[in-house]
Amino acid sequence: MDKYLIDSHKLLWHLDRVTEWQDKRVIAPVYIEISPVSFCNHKCIFCGIDFARDKGFKLEREALCKRLEEMGKAGVKSVMFAGEGEPLLHKDLPEFIRTASNAGIDVSVTTNGTLGNYDLWKETLPHLTWIRFSVDAGTAGVHARVHNVPETFFERTVESIEQAVKVKKVQGLDVTVGVQFLIIEENLNDIENALSLFSGLGVDYISLKPYSLHPQMIKKKETVYTDEVIRHIDDVVDGYRKNSGLNIIFRKEALKKYMTKIKMFKHCSALPFWGYISSKGDFYTCSVFIGDERFKTGNIHENNIDQIFFGQKRKQSIRYGEDGLVIKEECRLNCRMARINEFLEIIENKPEHANFI
């Protein structure tokens, strides 16, 4: 059961912001993704942002903490630490998490988990709404193949997850501990092993999600899904749902939409509702276009949040998303804002006889 609506959207719970957007078009984002570093300790064969990978960039502690405080005052509701590299590689990540939480922002982390341990989770989990471990395997061999790491990394990752679950239980925390499995040809037959493993670890859920080709990827990987693949996953998932208490979220609808190769919206109206801060400190209205000046609206080391959110550059970028961006040719299929764009397109196109509900 997807009680988190991972395969949908939650803008229905922010209708006040939707109304504000309809009136002003430029609003403070509800959600922001933050990339603390540009480097990673894994080299996943499906990495969508390998083009942004670099050995040297990381966010400055003082600047980001200041901007996080400003974000809270501006009305940002949530942030996720993830991005171009592995967020746990930034030594100041615990302080970033605390600062955001103290600013009234819901905080999450997406990590490969290898560097995690009991002490780190004890320090950070009390301030998180959720943490998601990108494992994408159920055995050491498959994990090594798809993450391009030594097989020993798998045991360390599993132990890290176990320690996170332990901290949650010992401290009685509300934090959601989840595992992500991105489905590609190389790990398709490892799904059952993953469900077996994680059903015994005490995680809150495991999400099975489709791959999505990023337009800027260097090592492009074409993954083909078929009805046979869906049936196979369904059979495996149904078996474990009956025999274990593990919450399995098979993102079947997202997978089917990826199979069709059809984008169900003509304009990107989602840019006002979210944003992305790169490891260089650049703020983008969309993470698909890292490095593209059309979507860059400022830098947290040089500009305050008011300048970044409500300056002329963001206004122009938002307008471009609605009127100039060629969705069919430039955008990522099944992008993070796809379901939100479908919802906003309905709102923007009022039907006749609307009062006959």
Image (cartoon, rainbow, N blue to C red):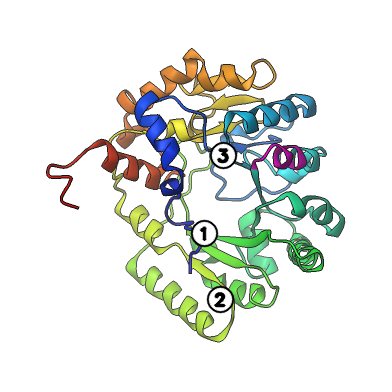
Farthest residue, direction left: 353
Residue range highlighted in magenta: 97-105
User: Which of marks 1 and 2 precedes in the sequence?
Assistant: 1
The residue at which mark 3 appears reads as 49
Q: Give the distance between the C-alpha atoms of the residues marked 1 and 3, in whole angstroms.
A: 25 Å
User: Which of marks 3 and 1 precedes in the sequence?
Assistant: 1
Tell me where residue 193 appears, x and y as whole percent: 60, 75
Marks 3 and 1: in contact by CB < 8 Å? no
| Residue displayed at 68% across by 58% down | 175
Tell me where residue 211 appears, x and y as whole percent: 47, 53
Marks 2 and 3: in contact by CB < 8 Å? no
| Residue displayed at 37% across by 60% down | 253
Mark 2: give few (<14), some (14-19) or many (20+) Cα within 10 Å: some
Label 3: state its secondary structure: loop
Identify the amino acid type marked 3: Ile
Tell me where residue 166 appears, x and y as whole percent: 79, 67
Label 2: state its secondary structure: helix
Please state which of residues 199 and 259 is positioned toward the viewer in this rendering: 199
Residue 192's tag is 2
The residue at which mark 1 appears reads as 4
Q: Is residue 333 visible?
A: no
Identify the amino acid type marked 1: Tyr
Asked if residue 102 lies in the magenta stretch, the reply is yes
Q: Left or right: 89 with respect to 235? A: right
